[in-house]
Amino acid sequence: MSNTLVTTPAPLGKKLGAWLYDALISIAIYFLWVTFTSPLIRWIIGGNQDWLADTSWKDTTVYQYYMITPWLFVLLYFVYNHVKSGQTVGMSAWKLRLVKLDGTRVTWLQATARSILSILGAGMISSVFNAQKRGWHDLMTGTRVVLMPDQKKDG
């Protein structure tokens, strides 16, 4: 991240574009989890049973962990990328960056709280009603999404 303080608030259209890209990645994480763990679960509960049709195991603790784990991976995707570079894949494609109010990188706590509070992107709609274009999840965590300037190419 450069030392230049970027202060241009990101427009809602670009935020929605980045959200769509990241939603697709989140869905992919979920599907990969199910694809690679289904054979293991089938083996654990007894061979050839149709574990999706068998509802008896859905009241178990194993099932609860099984269902929440992919969402923890999705949370990790957002938190890690926000802390590491301030950008998810979607944000990078749309030239957006998540920063603290002073323009520095967000902390693990801020990134985690913001990711949990964002609730499927609903908080970004509230940015339309804020002069600084900050969603309620940004207001609560002391963060903002900024538009990165175009990089000038030499030569």
Image (cartoon, grey):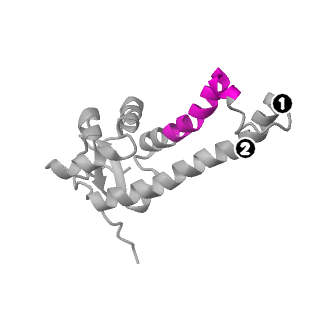
Q: Was residue 13 drawn as part of the magenta stretch in this picture?
A: no
Relative image position of residue 112 (x, y in whole percent): 41, 33
Relative image position of residue 127 (x, y in whole percent): 22, 49
Picture residue at 47% right of the left edge, 52% below the top? 23
> Which residue, given by chain and number where applicable, does mark 2 sit on?
36
Picture residue at 61% right of the left edge, 27% below the top? 65
Which residue is the extreme one toward the top? 61
Up-down relation of residue 100 to residue 44 (above or below)? below
Q: How many marks?
A: 2
Residue type of the residue flagged with mark 2: Phe
Q: Which residues are magenta?
A: 56-76
Relative image position of residue 90 (x, y in whole percent): 44, 56
Quadrant of the rendered image containing residue 152: bottom left
From the image, give the main secondary structure of the stretch colored magenta: helix
Quadrant of the rendered image containing residue 61: top right
Residue type of the residue flagged with mark 1: Gly
Residue 91 in view here: no
Question: Pointers 2 and 1 in contact (CB under 8 A)?
Answer: no
> Which residue, given by chain and number where applicable, does mark 1 sit on?
46
Q: Residues within 10 Å of mark 1 (few under 14, many from 20)?
A: few
